[in-house]
Every structure is written in C-alpha cells, then in structure tokens.
Amino acid sequence: MLLSPRRRLTVGVTVITALVGGIAPLTTASAAPAAPRTVAGAPVSPAPDMGGVVAALNGAMAKGAPGAMARYSAPDGVRSRAVGVRDRVSGAPMDIHARFRIGSVSKTFSAVVLLQLVEEGRLELDRPVNDVLPGLLPDDRITVRHLLTHRSGLADYTEAMFQHTVPGFEAVRHRVFSYQELLDLSLAEPPTTEPGAAYKYSNTNFVVVGMLIEKLTGRPVADAYQRRVIKPLGLRQTSYVHPDTRIKGLRVRGYLHPDEAGAPLVDSTEQTVSWAQSAGAVISSPADLNTFTSALMRGRLLSRATLEAMTTVTPTDTTNTRFYGLGLRRYDLSCGTRVYGHTGTVQGYYTYAFSTRDGRRSLSAMANTSNRGEANTALGDTLEAAFCGKRPAPAPSARTATAPVRDTQSLPAERDLPERR
Ligand code: REY
C-alpha cells in the first residue's frame, strides 16, 4: 500500500520521537524500564500472551464477573477471547461482537470532538470556559484545558449520587437530566482544588465539555459523535442513544454488584445513563473500540499538534505509571510500552480501551459487572498480557480453570483509514 505524503511524514516523526526517547515532556522520570529495541533502534513489540489474556479474563470472573472478553489488534491480525456469559438468564455465552456500555471511554470521544472544534478555531484550550458560556461556572479562571485534564476543581456529583450503590442506581436509571441539572449538583458542593492546581477525576468536567460541544455546534452531542467520529471511522456498533435505555442488536447484559455481600446481582443493562451523558453514555464493541483508539493514535481524527497536546500527561497517582492527558489516560507497562486510552465504569460494565502511541497495537477488554473493584483490577491484567506478553499470577479460585474459552481467532485487521489533515 502506498503511503500518503502526510502518513509518511507521521511515520518518520514517530520513529524519530521514539529514538530520542520520549514523547511526553512532563514525564521524563518513568518508573517503567525502556522498551527493548533492535540493533537498528526500532522498538521490539513483545508477542501477546493470549493465554495470559484468558487468565486475566478468568480472574475477572473469579472476582464475580458473569463474563469477560478481550480483543487484541496488531499488524499480524486480530485475536479475540471470551469467557463466561453475556446473559445470565438465557445463558448466552459472552460474544466478542456484542455491544456494551463503555462508561468513561466516552470521555475520549468527547475530547476528540472538542479538540476538533479547537482545531477549527471555535474555541481555545487556555481560555476560560465562561468566555464561551458566560456565567456558567462560578470561577472565571477555569479553562477548557482544566476540564479536559480534570484540573478544574469542579466536584464530582456522582460521588454523592452513588454512595449507596443499588439505591443510587435505581434512583437515576430512568431519569433524564439536563446538563445544567448535573452541573448544579456539582456546584452545590465546594470546589475540590483551585483551578489548575491538581488532578482530581470528576465527571462534571466532561458534562461541561458536552455543554461546550452543544453550544458551539448548536446540535446534540450525539450528532457530533456521529459526524466527527462514528461515521468517519465506520464504527457500526457504536452509538449514543441517550435517553433511550436500550442497547440495540447483539448486546452484553450488565450486572451490578450490590454493596451487601451475598445479595443478588442487579441487571443494570437498561438505563438512560443520563447521569453521565458526554462523560460516559456511549455504547460500543471491542472491534470498534480498537478501531477508535488505533485511529486516534494514528492521527486520523486530530492533527499531529493536537495529538501531541492530548498525549502530554501528568501523573494521576504516585506509582509513576498512570497519567492523564486531555481526555486520555496513559499507562506505562512493565515492559516499557506506553499505552493510551481510557477506562470505563458504568453500572454493570467495566471497560479498558488502549492503544500504543503508533496505533499499531490496540486492546479492548470488558467484564459485565461493576462495583467490584477486584474484578476490574483483574480485567486490567489483560493489558500486561497483551502488550507485554506477561501472564498474570494464577487466580486462586478453582472455578477459573473450568470457564469455557472461546477463540475467535484470525479476523482481518482493523480498517485502515485516511488521516485527518
Ligand atoms: C459511577 C459509579 C462510576 C458506578 C463513574 N463512572 O463515575 C464514570 C467512569 C462514567 O469513570 C457504581 N459504583 C458501579 C457505585 C459505588 O455505585 N458506590 O461500580 O457500578 O467511567
């Protein structure tokens, strides 16, 4: 295949950047070792350990997920694995083609849309939000960049909303909130930080991002996702249907864990997700998520300069392996590989969607449960297995050994798409 002049340029820059040893100026002191390289200096990609991926999926099941699945896409093809069930009543097996709620991976969709509007000169990253939406926020110093980096200090209204897991969920599952109502819940609480002072993850930031998108485009966010991301990338299993409560087509049912040990799981599939909207209400599939993160990193949605800004990160904790850019996480893995993407939690669903910086390798993983941190942690082991070839420690439960594994090997690689500008 012939590369366009722009693609050739991008490939060249990627190699040069890799050779000089870093792409994120704020994080030079990484705890992870440097990625192995060939004599010529090209990074070597460890082979994925798909047995390790299955072990991680089984680990999520051992911690209470009814099912789990992962899809790894690389230049040599696609490898998918699924365990357990997507429906506990019918017993239908987990299916790699099924759709599910991706929670906060939606934030990366929203960030892409807003950053395209920045590229089009419709707003500026370092200008106050109140310049676009006069009087919206109580502090004129809060900028667009503060929202995208979770540094606004706007309190997360969902912390109070979901203090009591199941009652909190049932109280909102059929509700339809306006963005303003969600923002007002946040503004009833004191700010968590001075604008810009510290990273503090808050759904409120991406509610305001949704408000900015709607103000600047004059249309619902659904239209912007469709026109700017879903259609250009051909994401046929991806949708934003708020406030419709259903997931169309082949779907994974989500099962929320109650706070009380031993209480039955709550089927949380149908809900408006109005409590999250532009912070978390997108529906997608493993193939579409890999196409999305890979296309993003390959520069198909944003210009190189914008992507550079999006992938410029600061730490989110003290491990020096977890970072946040603009609506985008960076995880530094044990083999030195850096992956970019997002995690998601919405009632009944945990999601990981990550890609390498060159977009050549991507992984999406999901488990159909939530309010079960240990299951989410186990699911996260798919990243080390896929990108570093590292097998997680065996899970203690005997149940994992018998979980059926379905292998939907040898699918064609994700679609190759032209670059944006
Ligand atoms: C909301 C709580 C999680 C879910 C959240 N998700 O903010 C955003 C994200 C969109 O970052 C719920 N937890 C659960 C509780 C805890 O109710 N008491 O785990 O399903 O993805």
Image (cartoon, rainbow, N blue to C red):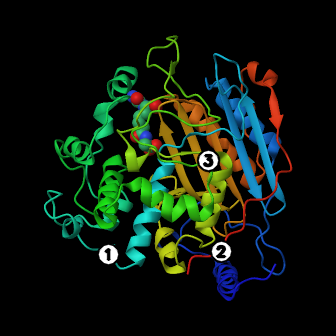
Q: Crowdedness of circle 3 by 10 Å Cα count: few (<14), some, many (20+)? A: many
Image quadrant assignment for residue 395: top right
Residue 262 against residue 327 in the figure, above or below: above
Image quadrant assignment for residue 47: bottom right
Task: Tell which tag, 1 or 3, sits nearer the viewer.
Answer: 3
Residue 5 against residue 67 in the figure, above or below: below
N-terminal of the pair, mark 1 or mark 3, is 1
Give the labeled residue for mark 1. 124
User: Which mark, by number, is residue 237?
Assistant: 3
Q: Are marks 1 and 3 in contact (CB under 8 Å)?
A: no
- Identified by mark 1, the residue type is Glu
Image quadrant assignment for residue 30: bottom right
N-terminal of the pair, mark 2 or mark 3, is 3
- The front one of 1 and 163 is 1
SS class, disc 2? loop
Report the quarter where the N terminus lies: bottom right
Residue 351 placement (x, y as % from top left): 57, 42
Q: Crowdedness of circle 2 by 10 Å Cα count: few (<14), some, many (20+)? A: some
Residue 399 placement (x, y as % from top left): 75, 19
Residue depicted at 85% across the width and 46% down the height: 409
Report the quarter where the C terminus lies: bottom right
- The front one of 192 and 163 is 163
Residue 373 against residue 360 in the figure, above or below: above
Q: Are marks 2 and 3 in contact (CB under 8 Å)?
A: no
Residue 361 placement (x, y as % from top left): 72, 60
Q: Is residue 276 left or right of residue 73?
A: left
Q: CA distance from mark 1 to mark 3?
A: 32 Å
User: Which mark, by number, is residue 153?
Assistant: none
